[in-house]
């Protein structure tokens, strides 16, 4: 039986919004008629139609009406060769059977798309770089709003702030600002959007100086669930501004923002990477604990030693069955200045090392999180489970390593899996009053997570989840004095609300009160929600079984 949906197509509905309306289950005749209208067999990926063009093209179908009823049967999929390349996700889960994709071209202050979705009862989800990895996204089935073309970067005349479109990502903002003599806080991986991580706090290499990414927010242009566009800042809707800095996914679509920028300082950063075999594991983690003073960063000039991260990983040239320990340090300054902090690690015999000085925008590429890294590839399944820590439990790290080798031997398909340990400079984070934002985990300097990585294969999903969960549980068991914490951007999706948004009762009370005020119908409930979605598309177990985590590019990303 055909599914019928009503889609507004006239300029009266969308105003002067320039967008692409792509219907994954639209009438084939309708889709082919558009191709014929533009005399193109294969339209480019960034095909852009103005609202006027859409209205003109659909005039034969709509007559004088403002909307068209379209046949939504699965057999009516468009035949354009480029269609299936548009919605590819970098991360699982796949979104199941979304009915449309709106690719916004210019919408810095337009809220008509949200208003229309609400009027017609269509669930909606804003996305940019498709890195959302939580299982809660699998509950979504509706209209996606792709903001990846909202890439404005405008440095303000006073040189103290930058205005950004909602679709900017780490690489383009790092390069644009650096070339102009500035930096700002952003995530650590080049291909990841700025806003997605920032709305969950946002960890990054400059947090030792400037705090988490959201600490640099000045104001946000937000579209609320009812379609109203508002400005949010310290002086306008200040309570909502507090919530957007750590729990922002729950409250609105940020179409643009203004944030602080800072003089870039040194011309190059120093980096050094090590590869150690497993027999050096205990020495490495003992040196790391000494480096950050067993969880107390005081007394160390760690602001300059901005970030170090390690992983258990398979490097086939060394071994296809036994993981090695990869570790990378980055220092804002010269090799000579960094050396005292690296002496203890240099004393541990390594299989290989590499070092050098490069401009800041090149640091992700040389430290394993650049555009060519596995995290930036499309189409793989990544089953994540994280844990926030203060020190490394060396015994636990050995248990997790042994489990890694055991699972790689049992499931060779998981060979691209990494167990990741991140150690951020924390001076800037700790300098900010934790009560001033919804981000709850300023006392957790270490962030660890496993990413079980493999080609989509439903028969492997259960094993992947079990391994990832066991690893997370080992980390938490090794820190019995800490309540389990979850960096919301790394969450699997089955964690408690408290572990993501804080155990202090006042935090959740305040967030729930703001939710009732700004989103009483809980429309923003697909990304690790404060209030669970009461009408999910499927059960949690279904979300990571078969059709979602292993689906063949049918879903499109967050």
Image (cartoon, grey):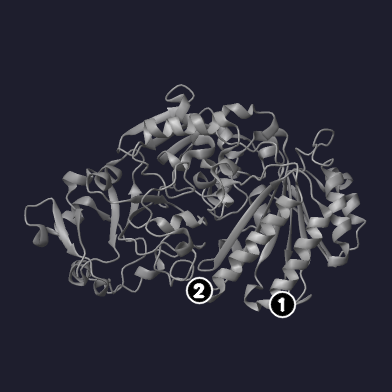
Residue at far right of view? 347
Q: Which residue is depicted at the point 58% across and 43% down?
A: 202
Q: Which image quarter: residue 34? A: bottom left
Question: Label 1 belongs to which residue?
Answer: 409
Q: Which image quarter: residue 33? A: bottom left
The location of residue 171, given as percent across then percent down, is: 56, 52
Q: Which residue is depicted at the point 79% across and 37% down?
A: 297
Q: Which residue is depicted at the point 10% across and 57% down?
A: 62
Question: Label 2 belongs to which residue?
Answer: 458
Q: Is residue 184 rendered to the left or right of residue 356?
A: left
- Residue 73 vertical placement versus 400 (above, below): below
Q: Which image quarter: residue 279? A: bottom right
Q: Within 10 Å of the Cα at label 1, are there few (<14), some (14-19), or many (20+) other Cα atoms?
A: some
Q: Quadrant of the N terminus?
A: bottom left
Residue at far left of view? 64
Q: Within 10 Å of the Cα at label 2, are there few (<14), some (14-19), or many (20+) other Cα atoms?
A: some
Q: Quadrant of the C terminus?
A: bottom left
How many numbered marks appear?
2
Q: Secondary structure at mark 1?
A: helix
The location of residue 509, given as percent across then percent down, is: 50, 30
Q: Secondary structure at mark 2?
A: helix
The location of residue 87, given as percent across then percent down, is: 40, 63
């Amino acid at each position: 039986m055909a599914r019928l949906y009503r889609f507004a197509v006239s300029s009266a509905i969308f105003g002067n919004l320039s967008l692409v309306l792509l219907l994954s289950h639209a009438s084939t005749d309708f889709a082919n008629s558009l191709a014929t209208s533009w005399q193109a067999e294969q339209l480019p990926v960034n095909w852009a139609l103005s609202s006027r063009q859409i209205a003109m093209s659909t005039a034969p179908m709509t007559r004088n009406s403002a909307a068209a009823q379209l046949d939504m049967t699965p057999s009516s999929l468009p035949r354009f060769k480029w269609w299936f390349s548009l919605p590819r996700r970098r991360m699982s889960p796949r979104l199941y059977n979304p009915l449309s994709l709106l690719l916004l071209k210019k919408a810095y202050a337009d809220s008509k798309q949200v208003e229309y979705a609400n009027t017609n009862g269509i669930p909606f989800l804003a996305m940019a770089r498709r890195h959302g990895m939580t299982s809660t996204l699998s509950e979504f089935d509706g209209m996606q709003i792709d903001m990846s073309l909202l890439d404005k970067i405008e440095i303000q005349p006073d040189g103290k702030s930058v205005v950004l479109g909602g679709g900017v990502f780490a690489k383009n903002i790092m390069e644009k600002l650096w070339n102009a003599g500035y930096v700002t806080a952003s995530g650590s991986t080049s291909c990841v959007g700025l806003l997605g991580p920032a709305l969950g706090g946002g960890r990054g290499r400059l947090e030792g100086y400037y705090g988490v990414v959201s600490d640099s927010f000045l104001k946000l242009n937000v579209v609320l669930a009812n379609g109203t566009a508002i400005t949010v800042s310290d002086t306008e809707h200040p309570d909502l501004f507090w919530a957007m800095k750590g729990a922002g996914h729950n409250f609105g679509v940020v179409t643009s923002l203004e944030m602080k920028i800072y003089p870039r300082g040194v011309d190059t950063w120093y980096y050094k990477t090590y590869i150690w075999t497993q027999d050096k594991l205990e020495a490495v983690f003992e040196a790391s604990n000494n480096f950050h003073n067993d969880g107390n960063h005081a007394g160390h000039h760690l602001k300059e030693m901005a970030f170090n991260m390690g992983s258990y990983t398979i490097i086939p040239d060394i071994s296809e069955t036994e993981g090695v320990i990869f570790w990378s340090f980055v220092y804002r300054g010269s090799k000579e200045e960094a050396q005292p902090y690296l002496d203890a690690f240099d004393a541990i015999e390594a299989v290989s090392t590499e070092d050098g000085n490069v401009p800041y925008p090149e640091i992700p590429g040389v430290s394993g999180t650049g555009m060519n890294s596995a995290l930036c590839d499309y189409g793989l399944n990544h089953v994540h489970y994280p844990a926030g820590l203060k020190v490394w439990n060396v015994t636990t790290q050995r248990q997790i390593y042994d489990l890694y080798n055991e699972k790689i031997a049992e499931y060779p398909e998981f060979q691209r899996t990494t167990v990741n340990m991140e150690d951020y400079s924390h001076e800037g984070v700790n300098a900010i009053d934790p009560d001033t934002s919804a981000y709850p985990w300023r006392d957790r300097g270490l962030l660890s997570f496993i990413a079980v990585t493999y080609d989509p294969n439903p028969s492997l999903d259960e094993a992947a989840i079990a391994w990832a969960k066991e690893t997370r549980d080992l980390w938490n068991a090794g820190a019995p004095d800490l309540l389990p914490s979850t960096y919301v951007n790394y969450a699997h999706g089955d964690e408690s609300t408290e572990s993501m948004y804080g155990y202090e009762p006042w935090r959740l009370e305040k967030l729930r009160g703001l939710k009732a005020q700004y989103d009483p119908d809980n429309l923003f409930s697909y990304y690790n929600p404060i209030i669970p979605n009461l009408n999910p598309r499927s059960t949690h177990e279904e979300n990571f079984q078969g059709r979602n985590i292993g689906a063949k590019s049918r879903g499109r990303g967050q």
